[in-house]
Amino acid sequence: MNNIEEIKNRIDIVDLVSENVKLRRTGKNYTGFCPFHANTRTAAFVVWPETGTWRCFGECNEGGDIFRYIMKREGVDFKEALKILAERAGIELQPLTPQAAEQNERADLLRKILEETIVFYRHQLRTTDAGKKAQEYLRTKRGITAETEEVWGLGYAPDSWDALINHFKQKDYAVQDLIDSGMVTERDDGRVYDRFRHRIMIPIRDMYGKMTGFGGRVLNPDDVPKFMNSPQTILFDKSATLFGLDRARKAIRSANQAVIIEGYFDVIVPHQEGFENLVSPMGTALTETQMRQLKRFTRNFVLALDPDAAGQKATLRGLEVAREALDHEGEPVFNARGLIHHESRLKADLRVSTLPDDLDPDEIVLRDKEEWQQIVSNARPIIYHVLDSLMDGQDIDDPKAKSSIVAQILPLVNDIGSPVERDAYRQYIARALKIDESALAGTALSQPRSSRSPRRPRKDHISSAINQPVELTSEQEKLYRVEQEIIAHLCKTPENRFKINHFLEKHGLQHLSPTDFAHSENQEMLRIILESFTQGEMEQVKYIAERIDVAQLATEVNHSPLPEQEEKKEVPHLRHLEETVRLILTVRQINTKQALKELQFLQSDQAADKEEKLEKDSTMQTRQVELIRLRGLIDRALAQQIKFD
Ligand SMILES: [Zn+2]
């Protein structure tokens, strides 16, 4: 038994969920109000102890095992959920390999250096003459209180080439470790010196509050650059860091909104004044990794970046990334078990607010809290903002300019999920550009869509012709095996994914996605593999290997975790593909059946309560219709001979 199974065995899902949900026992199962969406009338949440799973049939329309539950409840990723639950279960997780263990140790050491550096810089800030001047600057010029200074661990790097080096040398640290921590720089001739000198120092932590690096702001206005970060280290990756997220995550979740601004003090000062849902990227356009982090807490983003021209461009770039991160994450916008008739549209609300000239968020907050609130709530839908930016300085009577603007803005409009909203935007754009709206509608739908029309599943096909590839004692075991096989197949022939998705699309089904799987560890594997296809950073094999560093995952998949560079033999290759498709359909069939079973249970439970029967939630009825139709589509796809050529 691997650790994940052991954890699942030791932790009772009913106990776990009961911590924050009042569950009602009905027969073997439990129902309650979903903790993840606001609801008071209909109990749309089921816990199924037999399979160790939960599911919400309400707004969330999703479910999973205990790992998925913790991921959602705590807003953490799989790895973190694994740690939380392992601890709860009293299981010690072992790192994957000796190398990984060594790397973990190394990271711990570097973090220790950074933590100790905070103490050193704090001491400098509070006790030295130069430091006190820096402190004075924080108090009077930035409006930062003593408490805020303490909470964020602000400090002062003395104006010296070796103060920090000497401090650590006294404590018997190796110079190489200081270099690796990013705090000390090595010149070509081998001489070393303190990286940060005569700067206000701001500790940077990851979303879990662990130290990763520092940001330093100049005190002498002639020094450049004005802001300097740690270099890339094994702990610090600026493109993956959002400053303040460790402190902002709770507020982001409860406000259901993340405000993205630019600058350390623009996060710290509003935080001090009670606006805690702010984060800042590290002086670059928002990256996909950063957006993914935020998306765990909310899908509502307000970008409040610099008002100058560069800022506007950065905002546009930021939006582009925002779109990509949410759009191509490999997860469908809607749960695979649920809806089949939706295109993969962006399900996020991205707004932009323009700051008044020459003022930073921290200055605005200190001047007038109301004003800040106003700015955030006045944020406009990105379409308006983008349109304004595109039109800025253009002669919109020029047909070429018009057409170029339309070409840039329409993809954004087409990403809006609501047809009503889409129409409203098209009208707005048409008016602004003085063109006929029908011209926009024509361009908008140029993408070919095959088999989108919902066909009614024929009764005689339901539950017929089930090509089950494996016979196992329980559905759950079987599911697990099948999920693993799909992963193995995909690793062997990654290029098949296009054909697989094409096949699914042709049958009115959604593309392969992690939500197809019922087990979180398999979901995580599939997520990483799918992500490896779309990332452009590095070789796919390396990408996967770097991310699958949890022993508990590897034990299950090490039989074939990486794509092989084999010669392609035509016939077996196709058979392989057919087999993969059949497995995917089988997984979906099992899951859909299970979801229907749960939904029926939920409904019959409610039917027992007369009042609730009258108030029967229409969402659940919709879900049922969707599930039945989905089941029909899957059965039909399975019933026919799956063949590729
Ligand atoms: Zn829910």
Image (tube, grey):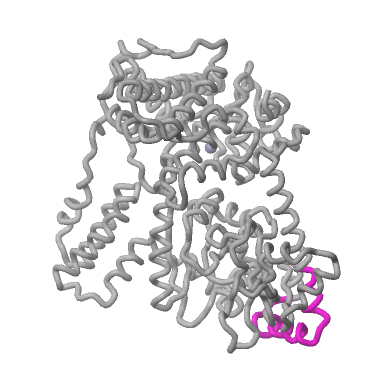
Compared across the picture, whether 437 is left or right of 502 comes to left
On screen, residue 601 above or below 306: above
Looking at the image, which residue is at 61% across and 73% down?
Answer: 188
In the rendered structure, which segment of residues is drawn in magenta?
A: 118-145
Looking at the image, which residue is at 48% across and 65% down?
Answer: 377
Give the position of the C terminus as an image quadrant. top left
> Can residue 51 be seen here?
yes
> Can residue 607 be seen here?
no
Q: Which of 94 and 469 is in front in this view?
A: 94
Give the position of the N terminus as an image quadrant. top right
On screen, residue 598 above or below 300: above
- Count the labels in the image: 0
Magenta highlight: main SS: helix
Residue 381 in the magenta stretch? The answer is no
Residue 94 occupies quadrant:
top right
What is the x, y in percent for residue 273? 65, 70
On screen, residue 458 above or below 177: above
What is the x, y in percent for residue 391? 27, 71
What is the x, y in percent for residue 394? 23, 75
Compared across the picture, whether 556 is left or right of 94 comes to left
What is the x, y in percent for residue 428? 26, 62
Residue 140 in the magenta stretch? The answer is yes
Looking at the image, which residue is at 59% across and 41% down?
Answer: 72
Q: Which of 629 and 520 is in front in this view?
A: 520
On screen, residue 528 above or below 620: below
Residue 570 occupies quadrant:
top left
Looking at the image, which residue is at 38% across and 70% down?
Answer: 313
For the view shown, which residue lies furthest in the front direction?
Answer: 189
Compared across the picture, whether 89 is left or right of 59 comes to right
Compared across the picture, whether 85 is left or right of 618 comes to right
